[in-house]
């Protein structure tokens, strides 16, 4: 078990009253699994992903990463947790526009204070792994959407995370590129044993899942 | 790549914003440096001029006016000559030269003439034209002038304005002003009886256009003995450094000599002090303006930068940047802007001072290197203060800002 939640609830206050984004969600995700989270828009998929990734704190309930509680961790502890354990892949790629592909990949290592040589070596190695070794010094705007997403995946892998969280990673890609990216994630899951948790609307993406979580109105659909 | 390089890459990526961001602070620092550079030279130049004018502080016995001193009435009060030692043995800064004087109106050959006792070694040739009498020895060092080089640079050699000291004046010799010499029909080498004592005229002083033209000068000790008022003086003329005067030299002198009246040659000193004060006030006003405009300008730039980079800061937070690392990135950037603004402001201000100084203050202006340090410190301080709030708000940007649905 790598991630476990217990009665996880997230509510927001609105002038019309409380809104429950997540309500009493209890789940467990095994280490090395490929989990997909699906559901209609506004169901709470991304909120669940944020909570699992230590990006938000729940209003109530528990989140355990291994044996580490995330639900009551401080801001700094959550930042440190994300930096050392989680890789993020976003629909909009979330690359820094003025950094080259290699520099974008080096950023987490830079935040960790790793030596420059090690950063560069790791970035080049990962670019080779995602098939972009000749694009190391290209800015994001000089890359195609698929290439940008592969750079984003390389950045997500550079800190050797145990969990890769992906929020609609194929949402901005055409079907062939989508499959290419999904295959890449599946390969990383299979070969490196990285746990992948994927939020998606896509049936194709969902088909890659070994654990499928469907949520509706903030609760897990039984 | 480290965070320092990260900042430089970002700055380089947004060069035009960088220029607009530091423009206000550069101009502001430039104006201050310019005013201060001219002000420094102006103060030095006025100090030298004032120094060359001679004594600018007069210590008189209590209850005595300057008129009494000049009229030298027979009953004009005196004060102990020991006061000179008191000043000399004090730790006062800015006292260049002391000249004790005993002045009395006496009858010489039926004429009422003012006899002034002076100490040769300390007597200041405050009347520069005396030089032509050929009585004077080595130049005195100026206590508050900027040194020999600066002195020469102001052309005093050519103007024959260097102060000299009277090396020797025998107790039986006297100097006679040109007017008095004419009245008494005396010339160099003549003998004259003053209060039943014979003096030899060692020199007739050239005309100065002052009351000194009608005076006879003799050794202070000789005059004290002659008049029977040993160890007493009518006045102590002091060469005070003008900046020291503005820093409260007069009040310090009053503490040392409480039972005296201490006055300055007001017009000259006060004009200089007022000019310097005005320059300093203008600088302070500009500094306050810079604090506000420069701080707001840099703060606004950083704030705009934070807003433009919300997603980027969100990415950094998402992948694990701590809030302190976000503060560091933005404050480091503000520091770079401040340092650049300070250096450019110094260069701009110095160039402006070099070009405008000769027109505005009629003075050649030299760069003041210490201002570079002040410029960078002030500019960086302003940039950091102006960026505190934007940096704090940047640290509060949510790490999930790039997510599609929350």
Image (cartoon, helix red, strand yellow):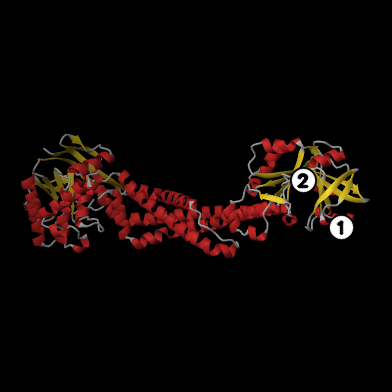
State whether residue A16 appears in this view: yes
The quadrant where residue B161 appears: bottom right
Residue A212 appears left or right of B3: left
Q: Position of residue B209 (x, y in %)?
A: 79, 58
> Residue B169: which disc?
2
Residue in the picture at 22% in, 55% down = A95
Viewer-side residue, A48 vs A24? A48
| Neighbours of disc 2 within 10 Å: few (<14), some (14-19), many (20+) | some
From this view, report whether residue A62 is shown above or below residue A171.
Answer: above
Residues under numbered marks 1 and 2 in contact, where contact means CB atoms less than 8 Å apart: no
| Circle 2 chain | B
Q: Position of residue B341 (x, y in %)?
A: 42, 56
**Real-space Cα distance between discs 1 and 2?**
22 Å
- Comes first in the chain, label 1 or label 2: 2
Viewer-side residue, A25 vs A16? A25
Residue in the picture at 32% in, 60% down = B14
Residue B359 appears left or right of B193: left
Q: Mark 1: which secondary structure? A: helix
> Closer to the observer: label 1 or label 2?
2
Q: Position of residue B219 (x, y in %)?
A: 79, 43
Residue in the picture at 42% in, 50% down = B380
The residue that mark 1 highlights is B182
State whether residue A40 appears in this view: no
């Amino acid at each position: 078990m790598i991630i476990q939640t217990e009665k996880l609830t997230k509510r927001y206050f609105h002038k019309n009253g409380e809104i429950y984004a997540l309500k009493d969600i209890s789940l467990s995700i095994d280490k090395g699994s490929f989990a997909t989270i699906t559901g209609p828009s506004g169901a709470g998929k991304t909120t669940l992903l944020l909570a699992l990734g230590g990006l938000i704190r729940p209003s109530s309930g528990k989140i355990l990463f291994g044996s580490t509680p995330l639900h009551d961790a401080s801001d700094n502890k959550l930042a440190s947790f994300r930096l050392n354990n989680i890789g993020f892949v976003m629909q909009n790629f979330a690359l820094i526009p003025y950094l080259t592909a290699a520099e974008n990949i080096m950023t987490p290592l830079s935040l960790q204070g790793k030596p420059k040589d090690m950063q560069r070596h790791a970035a080049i190695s990962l670019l080779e792994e995602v098939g972009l070794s000749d694009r190391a010094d290209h800015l994001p705007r000089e890359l195609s959407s698929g290439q940008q997403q592969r750079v984003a995946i390389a950045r997500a892998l550079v800190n050797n995370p145990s969990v890769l969280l992906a929020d609609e990673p194929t949402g901005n890609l055409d079907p062939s590129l989508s499959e290419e990216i999904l295959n890449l994630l599946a390969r990383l899951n299979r070969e490196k044993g990285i746990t992948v948790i994927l939020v998606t609307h896509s049936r194709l993406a969902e088909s890659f899942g070994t654990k499928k979580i469907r949520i509706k109105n903030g609760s897990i659909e039984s | 790549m480290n965070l320092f390089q990260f900042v430089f890459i970002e700055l380089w990526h947004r060069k035009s914003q960088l220029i607009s961001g530091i423009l206000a602070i550069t101009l502001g620092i430039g104006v201050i440096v310019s005013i201060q550079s001219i002000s420094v030279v102006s103060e030095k130049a006025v100090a030298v001029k004032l120094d060359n004018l001679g004594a600018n502080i007069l210590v008189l016995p209590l209850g005595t006016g300057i008129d009494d001193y000049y009229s030298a009435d027979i009953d004009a009060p005196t004060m102990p000559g020991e006061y000179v030692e008191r000043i000399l043995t004090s730790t006062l800064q800015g006292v260049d030269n002391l000249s004790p004087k005993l002045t009395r109106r006496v009858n010489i050959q039926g004429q009422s003439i003012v006899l002034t006792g002076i100490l040769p070694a300390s007597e200041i040739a405050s009347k520069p034209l005396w030089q032509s009498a050929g009585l004077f020895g080595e130049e005195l060092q100026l206590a508050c002038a900027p040194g020999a080089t600066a002195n020469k640079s102001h052309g005093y050699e050519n103007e024959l304005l260097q102060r000299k000291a009277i090396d020797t004046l025998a107790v039986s010799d006297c100097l006679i002003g040109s007017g008095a010499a004419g009245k008494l029909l005396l010339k160099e080498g003549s003998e004259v009886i003053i209060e039943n004592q014979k003096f030899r005229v060692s020199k007739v002083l050239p005309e100065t256009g002052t009351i000194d033209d009608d005076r006879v000068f003799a050794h202070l000790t000789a005059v004290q003995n002659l008049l029977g008022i040993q160890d007493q003086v009518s006045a102590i003329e002091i060469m005070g450094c003008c900046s020291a005067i503005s820093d409260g030299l007069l009040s310090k002198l009053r503490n040392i000599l409480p039972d005296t009246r201490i006055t300055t040659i007001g017009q000259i000193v006060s004009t200089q002090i007022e000019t310097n004060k005005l320059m300093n006030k203008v600088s302070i006003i500009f500094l306050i303006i810079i604090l506000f405009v420069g701080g707001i300008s840099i703060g606004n730039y950083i704030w705009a930068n934070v807003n433009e980079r919300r997603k980027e800061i969100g990415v950094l937070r998402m992948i694990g940047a701590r809030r302190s690392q976000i503060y560091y990135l933005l404050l480091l950037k503000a520091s770079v802007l401040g340092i650049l603004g300070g250096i450019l402001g110094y260069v701009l201000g110095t160039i402006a001072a070099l070009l405008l100084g000769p027109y505005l203050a009629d003075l050649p202006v030299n760069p003041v290197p210490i201002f570079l340090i002040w410029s960078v410190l002030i500019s960086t301080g302003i940039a950091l203060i102006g960026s505190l709030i934007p940096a704090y708000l940047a640290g509060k940007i949510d790490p999930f800002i790039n997510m599609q649905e929350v």
